[in-house]
Amino acid sequence: MKGLVKLGFRNLLRYKRRTLITAFAVAMGLMMFIILDSLLMGVSHESTINIMRYESGSGKIVTPAYWEDFKSTPLDETLDPAVGEKLTAAGIAWTRRIDFTGDMIFRGDPWEESGSLPVAVTALDPASDDRVFDLKQVVTEGHFLSPGEEGVVIGQWLAEDTGAKIGYPLSLRVKTRFGSEEVMELEVAGIMDCPDPYVNTGVVFVDISVADDYLEMDGLYTQAAVKLSTSPQPPQKALDNLNGALKGTGAEFHKWEDWSEDFVAIAEGKKTSAFSILSLVVLIAAIGISNTVLMSLFERTRELGMMRAMGMTDGDLRRTFLIEAAGIGLIGSIIGMLWGGAANLYLVTAGINYGSLLKDMKIGYRVSGIMHGIWLIRDYFIALAGGVGICAGISWFVTKKLTKMEITDCLRFV
Amino acid sequence: MIAIEKVTKTYVSGDVEVKALRGVDLTIQDGEFISIAGPSGSGKTTLLNLIGCIDTLDSGKILIDGNPVYDLDKDAKALFRRETLGFIFQSYNLIPVLTAFENVAFALNLLDMDDKEIRERTMAILAEVGLQGMEDRRPNKLSGGQQQRVAIARALVKNPKIILADEPTANLDSHTGEDILKLMREMNEKHGTTFIFSTHDRMVMDYAKRLVSLHDGLIQNDETRS
Ligand SMILES: Nc1ncnc2c1ncn2[C@@H]1O[C@H](COP(=O)(O)OP(=O)(O)O)[C@@H](O)[C@H]1O
Ligand SMILES: [Mg+2]
C-alpha cells in the first residue's frame, strides 16, 4: 500500500527522543566495530610491513632440508651458489644471510652488570643488505656494519636490557657448522631503534664475512632473502620470474608469512575478535530496537487496531514497522559511521601510544610504541548495511506479536 | 443487503463465560440508517464487530450481499473491509501523526488509488463534512467534533457500501453529537450508504430511521420509523 514511508518517517519524528537514543545505541556499537577493526587491521598491516622490512623481506630462499628444520637454523644446509647467480641474472633484489643462535655474554669493564643472554644472530652482507631490508635506516647510535667489521648491531630494547653502549665489547658463544664451540669477540658498533619489537629485543646482527670465519662456512650461506615488491602480496609476474630463476636449483622460496607463524596465528585470531565485536553490535542493536518497536507497538495499539480494521493486512503492518526500524537503523548507521570515522581519523593520524607496555609480551604483533588504525572502506559499508539490516530484521520479528493480537482487542486497548 | 442469522458469540476470560450474543437474527437493506440501541453490555459492539469482519462468531451466519464474510480468511477479510466497509468509533481513532487530509487519504492509500484521484476525493469529502481549510491540521489541533468529522470523512471517502459507527457521539457534548448525527444522516441520504450505529443515548436513537433494541445479547424490539 501507499504512504507507508511517510507514515514511518512521521512516527520516527513523533518519538524523537526514543528514536535518537536507540539510534545512538546502534551508532555506539557500529563505532566500536569500526574502531576495533581499524586498529586490528592497522596493527596487522604494520606488523606485516615490519616483518618484511626487518625480518624476512618478501620471503627467503632455502634448501628443502633447511626448511624442514628452519626453527633450529641448521648451518650445514647451505644454498648452492648458483642460486645467487640466477637471482642476479633475473634482476631480482636479494641478499645473502645466515641465521643462527648463540649466547650473548657481557662482563667486566665497562659493563655495569654482567650476564649472558640467549639471542638470535643474523649474519648479513653489509654491501647488499639494503637491497632487501631497511635496517640501515633505523640505526640511531653508532653506525651500521661495514664489510669485515668485527662488530654487532643490536636493537634499542636489547641495549637497554643489557646496558650496552657503543664501543662496548661483547662475546657471542656459538656452534660452528661442524658443531664445535666457538666464541666470537665483537664490539657494539651500532644501536638501532627498530619498530619491529622482535628485532628490537632479541636479534644481534653481525657481518657475514666475520661470521663465516668463526662458523667455518667457507663462503657458503643458508638463506637468500629477496624483495619482490613492497606489498605483502607481490605481483604474480614477480613470483613467476622468481620461480623461473629457481627452476632446477633445488632451492625453494618461502613467503614472509611462512617465517612468522606466530604472527599469522594472531592475525587469524584477530578475525575472531572482530567477529565477536560484531556480534556484540548485533546484540546491542537487537535489544535496543526490539525494545523500541515493542514500546511503540503498545503505545499505538488502538491506532494500529483502527488501521487494521480499515483493511491493512499483516504484511502492511509489518512493513510499517520495518520502515520505522530501518529508519532508526539508518540514522544509527550514519551517526555510527561519522563517529567511527572521526575516531578513526585520530587513530590513523595520532594512533594510540601504549609506550613499552607490550615490550616484554611476546604477542606476535610487530608494532612498538604506537598502534595506528587504517581506513577500511568496507567497514563503513558493513556498518550501514548491518545497522539497517539488523534493525529491520528485528522489527520484522517483534511485529509478529501485534499481528497475533485480535483487532477487537487492539481497539479496546487503552 | 446484510443477512444475520442465528448469530451467537461467547467470550471466555478465565473461568468466566459471557454470552455477548445469544442468537441474533437481523436483515438490513441497502441504504438503511439503523441504530442498534441498548444498555452498556448488551452486545452492541460485539454485533457491529461481527458485521465489520473484525471478530469471529461462534455459530450462525453473516452474509453481506450473499457473501459469507464470516467464513473468509484473515487477509481476505482485510481486503473486504478496505473496499466495502467504513468504521467510525467513539474515540475517533485518528492517526495522530497524520493531518486531517492524510488521515482521510489513508483509506484510499490502502486501495492504491492514484494520487490525483486521492487528492480530489479527499478534498471533496472534507469539504462535505465541513472541514474546508482545516485539511492540514493534525488531530491534536482539532476539537472532538471536528475529529469525528474527519473520521466520518475517512469512512466515507472510499464510497463504502456500509459504515459501522460504534457509539459515534458518546465522547461529544449533545449539541455536537446532534451535528454529527445530522451529518451522518445527510451522507446516508446523499450517497445511499448504509449506516449502522450503536448508541445508548435516547436523543441519538431519535435520529434513526430504524431502531433495533438489544438486550442481553438478544433483539428485543425492531421498529421502523417514518
Ligand atoms: N473481548 C472480550 N472479552 C470478554 N468479554 C467481553 C469481550 N468483549 C465484550 N465482552 C463482554 O460481552 C458483553 C457484551 O459486550 P459489548 O458487545 O461490548 O456490549 P456493548 O457494546 O453493548 O456495551 C459484555 O458483558 C462485555 O463485558
Ligand atoms: Mg460498546
Image (cartoon, coloured by chain):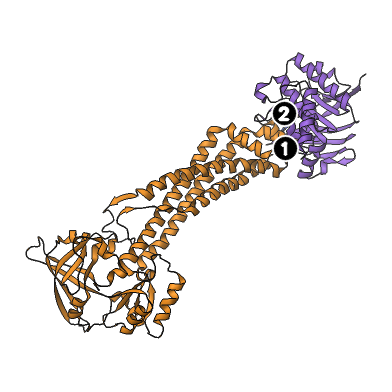
Residue at (47% x, 49% y) in the render: A280
Q: On the image, which quarter does residue A258 sit in?
A: bottom left
Q: Position of residue A4 (x, y in %)?
A: 68, 39
As drawn, the residue found furthest toward the top would be B175
The number of discs equals: 2
As drawn, the residue found furthest toward the left would be A109
Question: Relative to A359, does residue B129 appear above or below in the rendering?
Answer: above
Q: Which residue is label 1 attached to?
A: A308
Instruction: Assign the N terminus of chain B to one quadrant of the image.
Output: top right
Mark 2 lies on a secondary structure that is: helix
- Chain of the residue that carries numbered disc 1 in the rendered image: A
| Whether marks 2 and 1 lie on the same chain | no
Mark 1 lies on a secondary structure that is: helix
Identify the chain drawn in purple.
Answer: B
Instruction: Assign the C terminus of chain B to one quadrant of the image.
Output: top right
Front one among B1 and B119: B119
Which residue type does callout 2 highlight?
Answer: Phe
Q: Is residue A244 left or right of residue A104?
A: right
Disc 2 and disc 1: Cα gap in Å?
Answer: 19 Å
Residue B101: give its label.
2
- Chain of the residue that carries numbered disc 2 in the rendered image: B
In which of the image's four quarters is ligand 1 placed?
A: top right
Visible in this render: residue B171? Answer: no
Identify the chain drawn in orange.
Answer: A
Q: Is residue A311 left or right of residue A117?
A: right
Q: Where is residue B134 in the image (x, y as percent from the top left)?
A: 71, 22
